[in-house]
Image: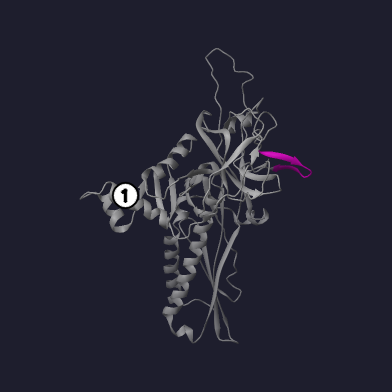
Amino acid sequence: MANSFSKEERVAFEDLLEGFQDALVLSRHVSVYNTDSTMMERANNTIWRPQPYIAQSITSTPGSSIAGSYQSMTQLAVPATLGFSKTVPWEMTTLELRDALQENRLGDSAKQKLASDINIAIMNAAAGLGSLVVPIAAAAGDYDDVALCDAIMNEQGVPDYDRFMGLSSRDYNGLAGNLSQASRSFGNQKSERAYERNFVGMVAGFDTYKFDYANRQTAAAGVGVTIDTNGVGSQASFVPQATSTSVGGQINVDNRFQTVTVSTTASVAPGDAFTIAEVYAVHHITKQSTGQLKTFRVVSIDSPSTMTITPPIIGAQGTPTDAELQYKNVEVAIAADAAAIVFLNVNASQVNVFWQRDSLEMLPGRYAVPADAGVAVMRASTDQGIELVMQKFYDIDSMTIKYRLDTLFGVVNKNPEMSGILLFNQ
């Protein structure tokens, strides 16, 4: 074929794929779900992924009947979409192609950008929806800062394995500085690596990584905001449900979010983190109160008095349903109708993210690019299933060759209560 790839180009593509896979730091630390291309096309590139069940137990002795104690188990799910279609296109003239090194550099640049797009998408999923919020008054630089992230996860029953943390460069360096001094001695590998290579590694149960593109959280500006969390029918009576009935029949329900009514949304912004007076987090399995205020995130501002938050406030008050008992996440101790909202992001700062592997999921996609349409096509997949497609086309009129490197993928935060953000200088 006139547009077929040369042997050198095929070797270069294999090297590019290897480098692309190495650059996908975050994708190796999230769960991966491979989809069927035909099914995804028919479902508008959206599939509902299940969240973990949370069961309730009862006391039972042999010989006694448990009739009437059987529970209705509610399976919650979230929509996951192949929502990222990223392309790096470029062209080279037949004069520029005389320098093969230049072609390789352009391919490296394309690979680097696409890998960055995937890493940023994963980071945004954690930074935007992670509901476990740890504000630190001082700058980064202490083991205890990371240990607080471990504590908030443990208290709420998040699995204690496969935990990861991404820190902005300045905050990562601050922690490395602490490690290089706190236990410095000859032969202390942890201290030496922190001092010589600015390396942190495993801290308080988290594998840590340095971001050079961390998000930035603005300071919250909302003042005097209150919310009703008292009694049945209040904001704390969210009822989880797998499906709801509409004109078209049963449809799935995304239970990660709740629209709440507050006294005002003036100056409140998406991304703001907050607590509610006397609304305490519970362990998701035992349902015991942690004694720590539950943290929430603002997802969107819907009107002057309503906003969407995550997670929903499931207090299981009054006569709760089985679903409320299973997924209860707060203990409401306030008797007043108006509970004060306290914002946690009081100062603008870099957003450091932490998560448990199963909370974030990536969905590799696939393009059905024809190989017999006059365009040269090469395709390959990484270990995680992320596919790269490289195409080449020669334009005889302008004597230029057009290249494009494509990838299709989706990222979803399946459970915001298993991921969160660490904010310094608050």
Residue 249 colored magenta? yes
Figure quadrant of residue 330: top right
Q: Is residue 2 visible?
A: no
Residue 253 percent across, percent down from the top left: 67, 42
Query: Which image quarter holds the N terminus?
Result: bottom right
**Picture coordinates of residue 255 (x, y %)?**
63, 41
Q: Residues within 10 Å of mark 1 (few under 14, many from 20)?
A: many
259 up-or-down from 82: above or below:
above
Residue drawn at 43 percent across, 72 percent down: 12
Q: Indicate the secondary structure of the residue bearing disc 1.
A: helix
Tell me the kind of residue under disc 1: Leu
Residue found farthest to the left: 186
Q: Disc 1 marks which residue?
A: 179
Tell me the magenta residue range. Answer: 242-251
Q: Residue at x 43, y 44 (%)?
A: 162
Side (left or right) of 217 relative to 204: right
Residue 284: percent from left, percent from top: 53, 33
Q: How many numbered discs, if any?
A: 1
